[in-house]
Image (cartoon, rainbow, N blue to C red):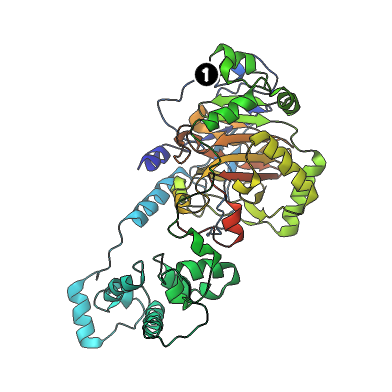
Amino acid sequence: TTTLMLLASCCFSQTYASTSVNVQNNSGVEASSGEEEESNMKCAGATQQETQTCDTEDDDNYEEVTDSDNKDVDYEEEEEEEEYDVNDEYDEESDYEDEDEEDSEDEEYICADEDEVECQAMLLNDNECEEAGTVERCKASCGFCAAEEASEAYGVKQQISSWEMMEEWNELQLYMSRKEAGEINDEVIRDDECRNHQDLCIKWAVDGECDIPAERNHMIAMCSPVCQTCHLESPCTQFIGAENSGAPALQPGDLNKLFKRIATASDSFDRLQLEGIIKADEIDTEDGEWVEWMKQYQPNVLEVDPWVVTLDNFVTAEEAQHLIGVGFDKGYETSTHYGGASKNAGRSHRTSKGVFYEWHGDNAVEQIMERIERVMGIPPIYAEDIQLLKYEEGEYYKCHHDYHDEFLQNPGGPRILTFFLYLNDVEEGGETKFEDLDNLTVTPKTGRVVIWPSVLDDDPLEMDDWTFHEAMPVIKGQKFGSNLWYHQYDFQTPHKLGCGEIQI
């Protein structure tokens, strides 16, 4: 509910102002690295706004959901200002529509006839259950609700909404009956109980996921009865019903420590001390070598509540071109919006393209990752694979958040930090904007990094509502970038086992 209220006010009636500054706030004041004047930063020491607006930038679903190419965005250009047309696809009305759609999807699922009298009369007279459309109208009278209730005998109650799914349910019952009667004599029998652990197991089986190699381990662990694989072992079973037992990336208080450490290498360090944001006892006197190393990247503290920090020249032009080339080699695909926190998963919500890259074995990227680990102090096993992004003219990613509630039940836990790297200078547009943070805007520049949290310092499992962000439309040229999302627990181990979607 909090998220929906926040989004109801976000990303509406937005105006894009052309500017040459590197980092700006809503008054257009430059906040580039190296400048000391207080007006250059919206934040240092400032508290959060009392009136929530909203913001957004580049996130993508680690899961391939659905989204569409959408390049039909029309922006009317003026000499000094680009104003979004409320009638085009970048329309505030779509946010309301998407929220309404999500609200309806969040309603409690109830299996019943739409019109009980009509359904019973129709079935009595015409026995039309197998006709198209009848199932959705007459689930109870056609026996689907009874089947759903009965499915609880084999684990989580299933959603059954088609005759194909009903046939799969009948196959499941036959298989389990034979298993319980001792008629199935497979050599390997798992120690864990053979149960369906998710309510869409039958649907996934109808979609053929029991036989898709990339989904095999997941389906064996989560949907053995429907896949008829109760005898097969899966490395994913270790995560079922288990708490996140690995070491967390962040303990309460560690998030502020991470950003304050970066800030000690910034030109704002003295001011942050004077304002009491960084206290003397929080400075590691043995950190001098690291601080001197960090200074080459010109850390710039743009906001402290929550933290938003940029680095410059973090990768060379050659390294940036290498990553862009990898994206083309792997094949940029239409990016998808992961429903999650934004509740705005509409067709026009995101129009960029992207691809995930398993970088291990790529020497150039390994060097970049070593650099990132030295900055963040978090091993790469906590991070997803690098996501490479490409935006053409008119493409954007509207108001969203990188945190997704669904990840709380996955082995890796929620996303906690975003490390976004710009790979080229964009001719015009393509900024990252945090509207809730006084329209804080970061301009793309080759080698520039912007880092921000998705969670709270005192509770790294709780979403920070202030870091919604937005990838502004590219007005002229192209935009290339890369995302690296950190999770609270080891992400790579379950992911490589095909268990990233396992619910613990």
Tell me residue 340's x, y (percent). Answer: 46, 49
Amino acid identity at mark 1:
Gly
Q: Position of residue 363 (x, y in %)?
A: 79, 49
The residue identified by callout 1 is 45
Above/below status of 107 relative to 231: above
How far across and down, in percent of the image, does residue 220 sit? Answer: 50, 71
- Which residue shows up at 61% across the image and 53% down it? 492
Q: Quadrant of the C terminus?
A: bottom left
**Residue 69 visible in image:** no
Q: Residue at x 46, y 75 (%)?
A: 230
Q: Is residue 140 left or right of residue 388?
A: left
Q: How many numbered marks are there?
A: 1
Q: Is residue 20 left or right of residue 302?
A: right
**For the residue carrying disc 1, how many other residues have a C-alpha within 10 Å: few (<14), some (14-19), or many (20+)?**
some
Image position of 330 (left or right of 495) = right
Q: Quadrant of the N terminus?
A: top left
- The quadrant holding residue 192 is bottom left
Which of these two is toward me, 77 or 310? 310
Does residue 6 appear anywhere in the picture? yes
Where residue 293 sits: x, y (%)?
Answer: 75, 27
| Secondary structure of residue under mark 1 | loop
Above or below, comparing residue 490 to residue 2 in the picture = below
Which quadrant holds residue 374?
Answer: top right
- Among all residues in the image, which is located at the extreme top? 274
Q: Residue furthest right?
A: 318
Instruction: Name above or below for residue 503 compared with residue 259.
Output: below
